[in-house]
Image: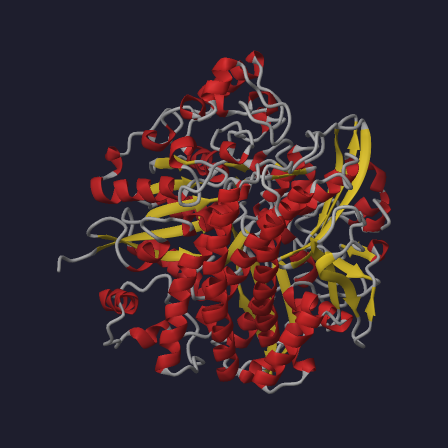
């Protein structure tokens, strides 16, 4: 049997809700069971050394694992960041201790990112700030890319936004990096892999014909395009309509709900109110925002 | 660096600090003074703060359902439900939600109860009791277990090692059973989300629950697809979940003696059984609302008796003087404060919330199913009813509740009427207010909204883990988890299993708990006396 190569991964959680790690558990193929025990992609196993939600150890013993990975495997591990990083005060988020003092997660994130092979920003919070960064952004929440820019850390960052992201978007991206290398992952101007975020929801929406025909739902539960109910599909880049969610069971528009654009850097503020129609002016603002976010 | 170590008074150097507590939701630190083989004092610290209540004002009222779900990725549907309930009232449609809307809301919330309970016992708690290393010499034919052995043979053992050592008590066969069920649980938990997605559009963060009902249409194929997945999940609960809990209970029977807590139980009730009665805590629900006091007496819930304290929380107490302003005052360096959680109290006292609290309320209220099933477990384990207030009692109550919810969901599916409406038309009022109270998987959850100029003026949440993991209140009374820890034995201070098993039995969700920063120290009931 060919040898399995172990790829160390540490999963750090900042200002988030654990929805991203729960979404990863929903991975259908490979299943999370396969990801943990077998191989993510032929010949490569994710050696998930640190993940608060699932790891057996407690307290200082897992902090030793976290710090030990950065020391023992410089340039050889992947940091997955879930949740945003809060910059307004160091005590807003802490994890473990160093020298008998609580350590801010912003410091943990920077230290781990500095010697990582790559950083994967899992979810809209980690990629762009997300909900915690919503007006008035009470904790100074930013994405990990912004933290790295401020700290002068040049480790490459792949953004996997979504609130939460589809598990395939993460698993597929990790598989590509592990098997073919970082350069094989083609990203758009805001760091998202093009294979998942390459086209507008609107382009392949099954209700597109209703939009073109001017048939619009005005209330929940009505047939027709959801544009008048605030659908952000025309300004949202994701493959939800074709990939569908939870093992291909359904998706937002399939359940009669407008797309909220949860993969976009402008989620939630500039896509709000979520249930109000996007107009031309908001459309333009959105486009300017996307360019700035680069 | 920041903070002091430890926050707890520790003149003799006997404190244990566990930071982080893993296999819970969110960021938590526990400090315990261990002396003479037992915990003498304990503090629970929430170590992350986000500030949801400051993000909500000024937004469109309907957006509250979607934003507040993001408080927690493990139980977002409970937040969606509580938020939709308070908006139902504020928008004047609380008595107009169609039967399909009520039933599909129950099915969405119910699917996530099953998800949350299965996740908790297997993915989060089981590694405290099951020894994965027992598979290191596995010679059998089961491919799943062979994969575990191959994993161990390769030598990179994250995330299963390191771990606390020295108190794994199961036989080799029992460990195989638990590991097999741990792996099966990874699959079946995903199925609960698929089930939810049929009506909810996606999970985590469903999109189906809205004020006035749900957005999806109800069709025969959706009902049968949901029923098929529900049957698979039920088989797992009956054949693997309940037996695994009983197996653990047999080997760790002393954990019926550990972690009693405050023995005061609060439930708002959950799963609405009719459309017309809209009182948030008096309406007819599958699992009933109530407060069971330390003397075992049951009383009706009065939201006016809920207060919040901030003396030991990282919030500025001067906020208490300015309730009308709605300002929010985090104070990270506050002297004597050790948590980002506030301390909610009911009628002045700490109260435990969650599956055990719901079982206790149902049991004392005389619910036939609850009483029969709880009595059967007591008899099987050979223990008296007072031992339910324990680490294992919480696991048992959670597992039984998964069965009760599963059975009820099968009934709600049958009541659905294909093609009938599931939502009502909504109008946003210039001003309004509402209270949304329901139990979440982890316990009593309340959302309160005030609308002004068609926008959210104020929004307040009091969530389950804020009750359970609260710090001391103004009188110095510890929170329920702190009380459960004080007195717990610790056989080995290098491997304090008893501490983490006790904390984890409450299924803490810190992402939920640490968000409340409208630190006004006033009665929640000012919003709405129910």
- Residue A151 lies in what quarter of the image? top left
**Coloring scheme used:** secondary structure
Residue A48 percent location from the top left of the image? 35, 56
How many callouts does the rendering have?
A: 0
Residue B414 percent location from the top left of the image? 59, 52
Of residues B129 and A125, the one nearer the viewer is: B129
- Residue B266 lies in what quarter of the image? bottom right
**Residue B246 in view of the camera:** yes
Residue at position x 46%, y 54% from top?
B228
Residue at position x 61%, y 38% from top?
B66
- Residue B281 lies in what quarter of the image? bottom right
Residue at position x 81%, y 77% from top?
B295
Q: Residue furthest left?
A: A1
**Residue B326 in view of the camera:** no
Q: Residue furthest bottom?
A: B382
Q: Is A240 left or right of A77, judged from the image as shown?
A: right
Residue B480 percent location from the top left of the image? 69, 67
Of residues B134 and B515, the one nearer the viewer is: B134
Q: Residue furthest top?
A: A280
Of residues A57 and A253, the one nearer the viewer is: A253
Of residues A178 and B356, the one nearer the viewer is: B356
Residue B389 against residue B342 in the figure, above or below: below
Q: Is A275 left or right of A171, judged from the image as shown?
A: right
Residue B170 against residue A171 in the figure, above or below: below
């Amino acid at each position: 049997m060919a040898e399995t190569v172990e790829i160390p991964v540490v999963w750090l959680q900042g200002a988030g809700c654990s929805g991203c790690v729960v979404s990863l558990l929903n991975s259908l193929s490979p299943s999370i069971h396969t990801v943990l025990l077998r191989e993510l992609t032929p010949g490569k196993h994710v050696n998930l050394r640190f993940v608060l939600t699932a790891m057996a150890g407690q307290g200082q013993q897992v902090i030793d694992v976290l710090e030990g990975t950065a020391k023992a495997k410089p340039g050889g591990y992947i940091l997955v960041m879930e949740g945003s990083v809060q910059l307004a005060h160091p005590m807003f988020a802490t994890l473990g201790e160093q020298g008998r003092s609580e350590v801010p997660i912003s410091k943990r994130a920077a230290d781990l990112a500095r010697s990582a092979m790559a950083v994967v920003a899992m979810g809209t919070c980690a990629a762009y700030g997300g909900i915690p960064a919503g007006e008035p952004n009470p904790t100074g929440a930013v994405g990990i890319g912004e933290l790295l820019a401020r700290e002068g850390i040049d480790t490459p960052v792949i953004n996997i936004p979504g609130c939460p992201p589809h598990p395939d978007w993460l698993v597929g991206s990790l598989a590509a990096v592990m098997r073919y290398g970082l350069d094989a992952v083609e990203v758009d101007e805001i760091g998202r892999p093009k294979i998942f975020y390459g086209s507008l929801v609107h382009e392949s929406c099954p209700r597109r014909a209703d939009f073109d025909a001017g048939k619009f739902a005005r209330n929940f539960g009505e047939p027709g395009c959801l544009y008048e109910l605030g659908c952000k599909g025309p300004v949202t880049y994701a493959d939800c309509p074709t990939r569908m969610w939870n093992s291909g069971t359904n998706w937002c528009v399939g359940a009669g709900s407008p797309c909220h654009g949860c993969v976009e850097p402008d989620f939630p503020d500039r896509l709000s109110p979520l249930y109000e129609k996007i107009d031309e002016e908001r459309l333009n603002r959105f486009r300017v925002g996307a360019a700035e976010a680069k | 660096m920041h903070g002091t170590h430890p926050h707890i008074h520790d003149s003799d150097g006997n404190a244990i600090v566990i930071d982080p507590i893993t296999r819970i939701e969110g960021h938590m630190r526990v400090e315990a003074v261990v002396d003479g083989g037992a915990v003498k004092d304990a503090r629970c610290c929430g170590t992350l703060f986000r500030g949801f209540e400051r993000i909500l004002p000024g937004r469109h009222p309907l957006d509250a359902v979607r934003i507040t779900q993001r408080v927690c990725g493990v139980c977002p549907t409970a937040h969606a439900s509580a938020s939709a309930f308070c908006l139902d009232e504020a928008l004047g449609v609380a008595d107009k939600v169609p039967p399909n809307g009520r039933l599909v809301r129950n099915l969405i919330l119910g699917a996530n109860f099953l998800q949350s309970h299965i996740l908790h016992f297997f993915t989060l708690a089981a590694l405290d009791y099951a020894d994965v290393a027992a598979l290191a010499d596995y010679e059998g034919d089961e491919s799943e277990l062979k994969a575990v052995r191959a994993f161990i043979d390769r030598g990179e053992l994250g995330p299963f090692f390191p771990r606390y050592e020295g108190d794994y008590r199961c036989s080799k066969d029992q460990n195989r059973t638990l590991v097999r069920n741990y792996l099966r649980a990874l699959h079946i938990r995903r199925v609960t989300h698929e089930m939810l997605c049929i009506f909810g559009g996606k999970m985590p963060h469903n999109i189906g629950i809205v004020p006035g009902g749900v957005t999806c249409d109800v069709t025969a194929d959706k009902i049968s697809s949901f029923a098929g997945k529900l049957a698979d999940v039920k088989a797992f609960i009956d054949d693997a979940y309940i037996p695994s809990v009983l197996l653990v209970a047999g080997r760790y029977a002393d954990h019926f003696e550990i972690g009693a807590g405050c023995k005061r139980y609060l439930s708002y009730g959950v799963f609405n059984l009719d459309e017309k009665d809209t009182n948030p805590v008096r309406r007819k629900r599958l699992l009933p609302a109530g407060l069971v006091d330390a003397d075992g007496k049951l009383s009706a819930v009065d939201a006016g008796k809920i207060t919040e304290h901030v003396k030991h929380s990282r919030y500025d107490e001067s906020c208490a003087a300015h309730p009308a302003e709605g300002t929010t005052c985090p104070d990270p360096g506050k002297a004597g404060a050790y948590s980002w959680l506030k301390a909610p109290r009911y009628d002045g006292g700490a109260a435990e919330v969650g599956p055990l609290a719901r079982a206790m309320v149902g049991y004392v209220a005389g619910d036939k199913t609850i009483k029969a099933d709880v009595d059967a477990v007591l008899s099987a384990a050979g223990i008296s009813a007072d031992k339910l207030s324990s680490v294992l009692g919480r696991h048992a109550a959670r597992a039984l509740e998964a069965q009760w919810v599963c059975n009820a969901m099968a009934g709600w599916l049958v009541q659905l009427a294909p093609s009938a409406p599931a939502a009502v038309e909504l109008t946003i009022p210039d001003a309004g207010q509402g209270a949304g109270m329901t139990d979440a998987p982890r316990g009593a959850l309340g959302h309160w909204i005030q609308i002004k100029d068609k926008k959210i003026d104020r929004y307040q949440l009091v969530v389950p883990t804020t009750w359970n993991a609260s710090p001391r209140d103004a009188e110095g009374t510890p929170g329920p988890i702190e009380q459960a820890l004080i007195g717990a034995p610790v056989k080995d201070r290098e491997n304090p299993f008893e501490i983490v098993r006790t904390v984890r039995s409450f299924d803490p969700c810190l992402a939920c708990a640490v968000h409340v920063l409208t630190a006004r120290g006033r009665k929640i009931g000012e919003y709405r006396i129910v």
